[in-house]
Amino acid sequence: MGISDQWWRDAIIYGVDVGTFLDSNGDGSGDFAGLTSRLDYLQGLGVNCLWVLPFFPGPDRDNGYDVSDYYGVDRRFGDPGDFVEFLREAGSRGMRVMVDLVVEHTSDQHPWFQAARADPNSRYRDYYVWVDEPPENPDYQPIFPGVEESVWHWDQAAGQYYFHTFYHHQPSLNHANPRVREEVKRIMGFWLQLGVAAFRVDAASHMLEPKGSMDFPGDPHAVLREYRQFAAVREGRVAMMGESDVPPHQVADFFGDGDELNLLMNFLLNNYLFLALARESAEPLRHALQLVPPGSGKGQWANFLRNLDEVDLERLTGAEREEVYRRFAPREEMRVYGRGIRRRLAPMLGGDRKRMEQAFSLLFTLPGAPLLVYGDEIGMGEDLSRPERESVRTVMQWSDDRNAGFSTAEEGALVAPVVTRGQFGYRKVNVADQERNGDSFLRWMQNAIRTRRECPEFGWGTLTLLESTNPAVLAHRVDWNQNGIVVVHNLAAAPAEVSLELEGNGGEWLEDLLRRERLKIPRSGRLSLRMEGYGYRWLRLAGMRSRRANPSAGADRGASRSGSGSRGRSGGGGLSGSGGEAR
Ligand code: MG
């Protein structure tokens, strides 16, 4: 299998919400025409996979994760023609499109549910999970404590209770029912045929949990294998990225034997990453990297700093979570559901440029495919006056024009508010200013992403944690195809001296990929580095390059194409996925 067949292993994924990105027609809601008009911006940023959050028709009581028609585009965002134009324009710029597959549940407005509740003999009744009496001790706790009291909801028309993992207006689908599985495959087939390259499988782990009377025959994971197999037969290069926030010993199960989900959102790493940032210590990250092995041949981790939900810290102990709260969410209103933080990254880090760069440097260099969300590339903030997770879903800040350049509608007609006040208000944080300023965070981000794309080792390589003489310093290396990169992060505010053992590389050169300078590794192999506070360095082992130039060692074509560190060569190569490579 060629490298581009597993494009997802090395993708730079950008999560975008159509409704809050750009409004092209002045009706107050972002739309596909608006998103399409900003594809050049996204191409300039360097991302190559666009995860488009749900845009399907539905009541929109959960940011689109309540679907009433899986085959449509909600009117607010345009029509299916606009979607297809978007898909085509993205593809022509080398960007693949990932859509949400939201099938753990439907909206209660979906015709299946309406038919199911109206008639116990309907063929749709068993699409859902019903009981006469909820169990006294349900295995399940509601996902949104304080908002929902139970996972069972009484339905007057049905005369029974139905199961819902999430909000009561989102009845869970019964994936033990083969008819439901056929429906899911029809939905996947539809979007694949249009040309989407990937699905983000919403609530993948919850789909497989037992719910009351619903019982899977055999292994629940067979359901995900069935969906993956269907998708892979239709389109061999499909990627399925799963949301499965489960304990460490279960999480790798979702890769299956390489026949289940290709990408898993790395919630575990995210928990410990925030603990490491809060503590200014490398130890939590070392722990996390040992707890969950790199994706190996079976799949890949999708690493992220923030997504468009809360920072979910439920994998930490209570005391650890308190540490993160104290540092990054000191006020109660910044927390949610008793487990997380409803803030964006930049304000959590106090808008400190060095800390923001370092956080993204960690994201880009830990093994996996990095995932970022719209607005974080310019350091947008949140609006805590909004309920629950809506706080981080404010509109994209394009300029200091009215409504941050998002829309020409009246302020009251906007789908979500503009952050107007304070350090993160749109007059201070916007794309136009940062495009003009060569030292801006956006410019830094563009450079970091371009450099990351020239380093396939991060997506493909083998991780080694290096012994560091300083507990604040995380040092690791990734090796792939006779190429290696050494990465060093100082998580503390204070400068640090660190000594690294690079056994076997004594006498070789290291090329600093972000500063364009070279370092010599002493013959002993012991390298001493002085790191700035919150500093980070990406150091390519340049000695390997000269070895590879030896014809007797360079038989592997893959090695000669990849990661040479030379901009000229990799810029047009297959690996960096330049224009036109996507389907
Ligand atoms: Mg609009």
Image (spheres, grey):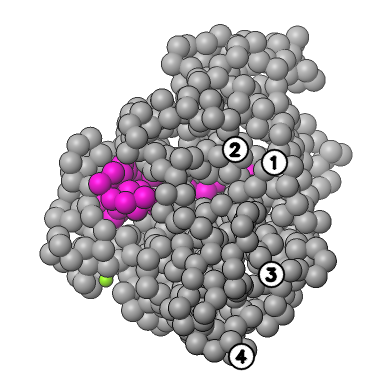
Closest to the camera, between mark 3 and mark 2, is: 3
Are the residues flagged by discs 1 and 3 in contact, CB closer than 8 Å? no
Count neighbours of disc 2 (C-alpha within 10 A) and say few if under 14, some if 14 to 19, many if 20 or more. Answer: some
| Ligand 1 within 8 Å of the CB at mark 1 | no
* Residue under the image location 58 percent in, 33 percent down: 316
Q: Position of residue 337 (x, y in %)?
A: 44, 45
State how far apart marks 3 and 2 are (Cα).
Answer: 29 Å
Residue at numbered disc 3:
213
Residue at numbered disc 2:
315
Q: Position of residue 96 (x, y in %)?
A: 54, 64
Residue closer to the observer: 146 or 426? 146
* Disc 4 residue type (three-letter): Asn
Q: Position of residue 479 (x, y in %)?
A: 73, 35
Are the residues flagged by discs 4 and 2 in contact, CB closer than 8 Å? no
* Residue under the image location 39 percent in, 39 percent down: 335
Residue at numbered disc 4:
121
Residue closer to the observer: 156 or 251? 156
